Image (cartoon, helix red, strand yellow):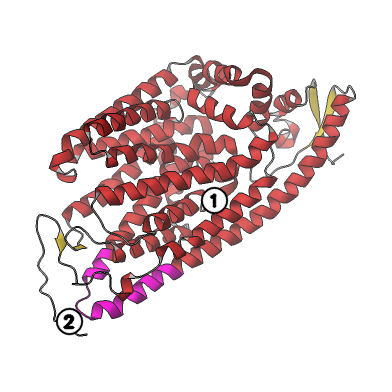
Amino acid sequence: MVHAPEEVVRDRGTGVVPEERKPGGRWTRVPPGLLALLPLAVFAFAAWTARWVRPGGDDWCFLPVVRDGGLPAMVGKFYLHDNGRIVNAVLVWAYARFGEAGQRWFAPACGVVVLALLWAFVAAVVRAARLRVPRGVPLLVAAMVTALFLFGSPNTYKTFYWPAAAVSHTLPPVFACAAAVPVLRAATRRGKVLALLAVVVTGVALGLLSEETSVVVATALACALLLSGRLFPAARRRFLRVCCGAGIASTAIGVLVLYTSPGSVRRRERKHASTILTADSLLGALRGFGEIMASVLTTWPYVGALAVGLVVGVLVSGPAGRVVPGRNQVLVATAWVCTLLVSGYVCTVITYPVFGKAVVSSTRLWNDYLLLYVLLLVYVGALAGCVVRGGVRGRGRVRSATPVLAAGGVVCAVVCLSLTASLGGLASDITAHAHDWDRQDRAMRARAAAGGEVLPYKRLPLARMTEPFRHGGRAKWPASCIAHYYDVRHITQSHKLP
């Protein structure tokens, strides 16, 4: 059937143009749910590998505390001695109470939580923006973002498999996105009250969980508040402004409680945090953040976020037709970039006194703002997809859209294959480490049960995890925690497995 060409008239108020008479044409009948199986398969493979995860690094210190004293001991350790992160202590207790089994199931559970919350977040954004997308698109976006966020890092082990790092730097930014879901979906007075309560509770919790994510959240909300007159619809503007203000205030309260805690005071004294605003520290943080950005921008798998955004942009339509990027969309992208740069640099500034030049190699610290980067790429890709779709007219639209969708799907597939290959090498290392760990664990437990007070321990390094007897045996941490774990006086360095 031949359709007469339709006059294209842009609506200045809505930023959309009329769509074809049959917006569900052949090229829009793409099964995005099937494409989502690619990143979901990557996640399934990574989750299956998690059965070989064993304690290491900070876990040596957490496990015996939870075993001997439970939740009160863990909260006391964090609040009074370590860093003041009360919510962090609760989350550590939630998996450490199961001992070594908790180490193994944490990564799959963490991944499911990340995927579910991001899926809910994307669906809420689509609904709030009154966009129409084929079924399966929110799952596709959430699955691809999850795969890139968890497995695109230079050190996937510390991002996904190591519970101590995931609790502090991987989950917090996802929790922040989850807090936006009830806000975006609130339609009734009761719903708005519950949404505001969720924002306040999440803000305080984030302040007591991660200083870096708190910086990102406060910066993003402040930016949204400044631009609310341009970005928020008039009917919901007051409510959204109240939510932004409540989010900033509650996050600040949580950070204040953390900052004034005995544990945080002790940590600042140990790490010479008074140097945070010195010229050397600020310049060092700037150089470090520049290196981090260079590394992130040249990590090619993140192009998968652009690809999935392109697919979304080609498929999406608004309440009156096809979405056309306008000034507000460009403003959002610009503000997004500014938020990423400002919050990322501030995060580097506050961690620089503790880590020094190692802020560049401690890739887990990037995760607090890395999710913002991945979501930005999806948004930019979606705008590009809208432009591509808007540049086609009449029947040419049928001929031109399919290759674009196919190209986006191919890029997503290539990225997922690359992530799988990287995970395959890591899985081999994790498996070999687990076999050595289990062998040594059995021997150490047997010697401790026989009355041994001093046990030999061979270093089992994996993914730059902290092991005792580094630097020629001079750096012994966490040797004392390992001794506590096996209930002996201390351990000594051994150069061979028992």
Q: Residue at x 21, y 69 (%)?
A: 390
Magenta stretch prevailing secondary structure: helix
Whole-percent x and y of residue 482? 73, 28
Figure disc tally: 2
Q: Amino acid at mark 2?
A: His
Most extreme residue toward the bottom is 1
Q: Is residue 262 left or right of residue 9?
A: right
Asked if 123 appears above or below 364 in the picture, the reply is: below
Q: Is residue 126 visible?
A: yes
Whole-percent x and y of residue 399? 29, 80
Q: Amino acid at mark 1?
A: Pro
The residue stretch that appears in magenta: 386-410
Q: Which residue is mark 1?
A: 154
- Secondary element at tag 1: loop
Asked if 463 appears above or below 423 in the picture, the reply is: above
Q: Give the label on residue 269, or none.
A: none
Q: Nearer the viewer, residue 281 or 175?
A: 175
Q: Which residue is mark 2?
A: 3
Q: Residue at x 30, y 30 (%)?
A: 194
Asked if the stretch drawn in magenta spans residue 407, the answer is yes
Quadrant of residue 140 within the rendered picture = bottom left
Asked if the stretch drawn in magenta spans residue 207, the answer is no
- Secondary element at tag 2: loop
Other-residue count near label 1 (Cα within 10 Å), few / some / many at <14 / 14–19 / ≥20: some
Q: Residue at x 33, y 25 (%)?
A: 250
Asked if 397 appears above or below 62 in the picture, the reply is: below
Quadrant of residue 233 within the rendered picture = top left
Whole-percent x and y of residue 163? 58, 37
